[in-house]
Image: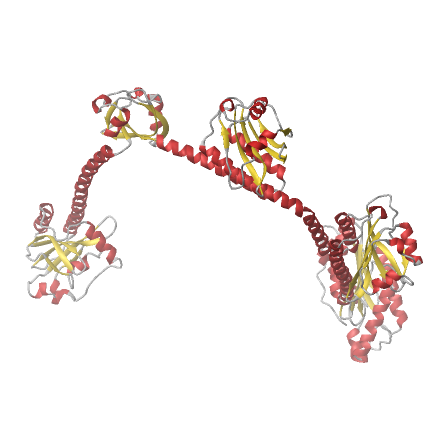
Amino acid sequence: MVHFSSPDEHERLQVLYRYQILDTPPEAVFDRITVLATRVLNVPIALISLVERDRIFFKSRQGIDPPELDREGSWCGQAMFTQGIYWVADLLEHPIWCNHSFVTEKQLRFYAASPLCTTTGHRLGTLCVMDYHPHPLDEEKSAILAALGELVIEQMDLRLAASRLVTTEKALKHSESRFRQFVEQAADVFLIYDEMGFVLDTNQAACDFLGYSREELLHLPMHLITSRWHPQQCRTGLLTGQVHRQMDHYRCKDGTLMPVEVRLGWIEIDEQRWIHAIARDIRDRLIVERKLKQQADRQRLSYSLTQSLRRTLHLDDILRTTVAELCQLFATDRVAIFRFLDPHQGQVVAESVVSPWLSIQGEYFTDVCIHQTFEDLSRNQRVLIQHPNIEQSPLSLCHVELLRQLEVKAYCVLPIFLAQELWGLLVVHHCTAPRQWEEWEMGLLLDLANQLEIAIQHSQLYEKTQYQAQREQAIHQVVKTMRRSLNLDQIFSTVVNELGDLLAVDRVVIVEYRIQEKVWVHVAEYRKMAEFSSLLGQKIDDENNPIAARLKTLEIVQLDDTSHLHDPINKNLNENFGGAWLLIPLSYDDQLWGSLTLMRSPQRGQGWSPHEIEVAQEIADHLAIAIEQSCLYHQLEKANQELSQLACMDGLTGVANRRRFDEYFYRQWERGQQEEIPLSLILVDIDFFKPYNDTYGHQAGDDALRQVAQALTHSLSRNSDLVARYGGEEFALILPNTPLEQAQKIAAKIQTQVADLQIPHSASSISSWVTVSMGLATIIPEPHLSPQEFVTSVDCCLYQAKAKGRNRYVANSRNVVNFFTNHSPRKIDHG
């Protein structure tokens, strides 16, 4: 037998199961439909069949006993997938169903079914009728059966909706009960009141919080509970349907105002609108938030100071930031940092003060009592001292008198230690009135004192290493400049200036050794004083020069006192600028290039320290590398120029090749556009060159090409003119800034030059010697003109010269564009 199913069988079954109708007892509403079907259609059997995976369940049945059948081989399993009514007039004659048990055993002969199809298109079963006699199904009865099938689906939908409604009502009642229980057990205040502000319902938490009984709260007006009750504003704000949140204070029965966070919203029941308010006691939260804010402020200021330490190593900047932040955060009148210069004296090195109180920035205080107050403190006994009221403090009389002079009413002070020694004090003054500082403020001061100690340590390290850092930075700058540039003048200028500032010398000179001239030449210099005479360009003899001899062995020459020099050359130099000299050889590949020379005047009375020699040597090494790289670069540049020339030259004739022609032609075309000057072009073709090759051989042909190329070159007199081999036996001459008349003179000169060569050509039909044909044109390039079209116009002139008998030139004296539009490109004739 056949088992029919749809591609979306699983989805179909899920829809069927959602109706929850399978295996349910008979229902009158469905039985009335099957009874009506039997009577109207005059048949004994009517079934509402619901097709499951492996069976067919009959929700209603008339004329048949079994409540279900196997789906395998069932008629309904097929009929539910048909479009419209499915019917068989005589099952006994049906090729598939004639052997069905319902036909052979129960003697059924007629079957008709209407598919049960949901609004989503899912087929759930059929409403089918059967008869023991064969007969057709007319249109009227077919329509009735279809209508009854639709009625079955409608009743199934109504049944499902009713079931869901019952479930929803039960859930609603359960939810209402749970909500009431939740409201009563909630710790938050719950109030429901009408649009006029009278309380309609509440919970026990509201009674406990506000101090009213439930009876007292009911019908109590909201304006007695909150001052923010404005009926019209509240109603307008809540009509948007959104929950409104606000901070408020609820007034208790005893008049106490309690801070609350309130959520307001609408409740609509049976077209009545009420307002619900859920208020939460936020007293504890406000305390926590205040503490968290204090902690956040403490962390922020600590972080700010830490960031200041990372941004700068200047102690003054860090101290200024610290006092300014503390003064603002503590809302106090003065914050100062006092530094001890000795046990009896100190200075206010940083201050932030609020007007009109006296500023003590930079003031020195000499008072033994200040140090005595803290002299027993050590690094392991950090104590923060505060006095909320100096008039009631146990301070020494001299200390109190000093604070009175500064108009201080309350103060706290924290010692700052450095290497177990008392470095200074972090002081907070309140001048307006006595003040008790809070615990978090004390903790913040302790944190900042730690940060200040770190800042001071960093500052001292900075002062110690600053000079070294400056040296390293200068060396880095010199090296960076040398790596960036291959320009020796720029490199030399950077080196002498940076080295002069770095080592505080009076003069720095770079000297080049010119071995062929046997002299040393000063090529760059730094002079600390403008009145020092310039040594730039000065030449020093190499022969009989003991210092030069030592440099040529690559020895560093250190002279702390040049007054002991006796050789004539250096003795004369010493008279011009004596003192201390340091000469470092500059070399690469074991070849001496010159020297880096540093000079100090004798008035300085200072020689050369090992560190200075080390720094100068390091820079000299980098300078030598830069010199070598510059020399290699210039050698490479020269080689590249030679290669570029070779790449642009025709190997046979020695003139420019086609690549060079294209590049130069387009460059001159752009120049002509920019400067609006004429550009002339001559194309030259050797007449009957192929027969020449055939007659004299290719070797002779190559010689002829070379001679013609030389003749063309000799016909030109300007460096800007270019002769190029255009292809085969063709040549091209580019004549920038050349009018047509001058180009014609050059063409005539070419004819003369080639004729004077008297190269025999027995295969020529026009002459016994080699001749040339030429086309030429002149144009002032414009943006709308095409350089390719211009070349084509010249080529057309060459074609005309050959067509007119060769051994001549044709010049295009008309407008090039008009000429080109009237001429099509020629086919090149290499004859």
Q: Position of residue 308 (x, y in %)?
A: 57, 40
Q: Quadrant of the N terminus?
A: bottom left
Vertical comparison of 415 with 490: above or below: above
Q: Is residue 276 toward the left or the right of residue 764 in the image?
A: left
Q: Is residue 216 toward the left or the right of residue 109 in the image?
A: right
> What residue lies at 50% left-to-right and 25% top-to-bottom?
393
Q: Quadrant of the C terminus?
A: bottom right
Q: Position of residue 537 (x, y in %)?
A: 88, 53
Vertical comparison of 302 with 796: above or below: above
In the image as oriented, which residue stretches furthest toward the right?
Answer: 568
Residue 355 quadrant: top right
Tag count in the figure?
0
Q: Position of residue 335 (x, y in %)?
A: 56, 30
Residue 555 quadrant: bottom right
Q: Nearer the viewer, residue 508 or 672?
A: 508
Q: Is residue 550 toward the left or the right of residue 485 in the image?
A: right
Q: Can residue 422 be seen by looking at this rendering?
A: yes
Q: Position of residue 421 (x, y in %)?
A: 58, 40
Q: How is the image coloured?
A: secondary structure
Residue 129 quadrant: bottom left
Q: Is residue 370 toward the left or the right of residue 189 in the image?
A: right
Vertical comparison of 210 with 119: above or below: above
> What residue lies at 87% left-to-right and 43% top-to-bottom?
531
Q: Nearer the viewer, residue 327 or 765?
A: 327
Q: Can residue 203 be seen by looking at this rendering?
A: no
Vertical comparison of 649 with 268: above or below: below
